Image (cartoon, rainbow, N blue to C red):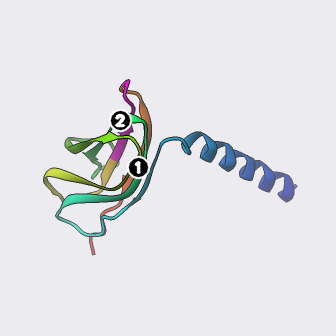
Amino acid sequence: MKTLKTYALIAAATTAFAGAANATIFNMGVEEEGVEVVSIDGVNAPLGSELTMYDYTYGEQGEELGSVALAGPSIDVRVQLDGRADGDLLAVLTGPAGNIIDTKVVMIDDN
């Protein structure tokens, strides 16, 4: 039975990855409180997409802190925030039609 559960989990993960492979946010470089710029290793998105950073301090989408327009797949994306982020952030990738393509929580290390 464990084998069947393992295969089901692998199949679900593969399906989820295949759906997200077309538009994904990769590795965000934020590791300290009081950050004013968020660095993202790469974003795979269609032309005309936008990456928006929101406050996520209390585990829900809060105030918009900054955004950047994307001209297709991009590497080394930097999002300038309107103020200092003292808590976790939520990155929301929207497509050209305004549909949400991907989201990722950015945990700010408060140590």
Classify residue 64 by image quadrant. top left
Whole-percent x, y for residue 51 in the image: 32, 42
Horizontal side of residue 37 vs 28, given as left or right: left
Question: On the image, numbered disc 1 is attached to which residue?
Answer: 43
Category of crowding for the residue at label 1, using alpha-carbon neighbours closer than 10 angstroms: few (below 14), some (14–19), many (at least 20): many
**Direction from residue 94 to residue 16 in the image, left or right:** right
Q: Position of residue 74 (x, y in %)?
A: 37, 50
Report which quarter residue 54 is drawn in.
top left
Q: Is the residue under label 1 in contact with that under label 2 (CB below 8 Å)?
A: yes
Span highlighted in magenta in the image? 91-97
**Quarter of the C terminus within the rendering:** bottom left
**Which SS class for mark 1?**
strand
Q: Residue at x 17, y 64 (%)?
A: 34
Q: Check disc 2 and give the amino acid type.
A: Ser
Which residue is depicted at the point 35% across and 35% down? 49
Towards the viewer: 17 or 1: 17
Up/down of 18 relative to 78, above or below: above
Quadrant of the snapshot with the N terminus: bottom right
Quadrant in which residue 35 is drawn: bottom left
* Dot 1 amino acid type: Val
Identify residue for label 2. 49
Residue 84, image x, y percentages: 14, 57
Is 89 situated left or right of 80 in this image? right
Q: Residue furthest bottom?
A: 111
The answer to whether 69 is drawn above or below residue 5 in the figure is above
Residue occupying image coordinates x 41% and y 33%: 100
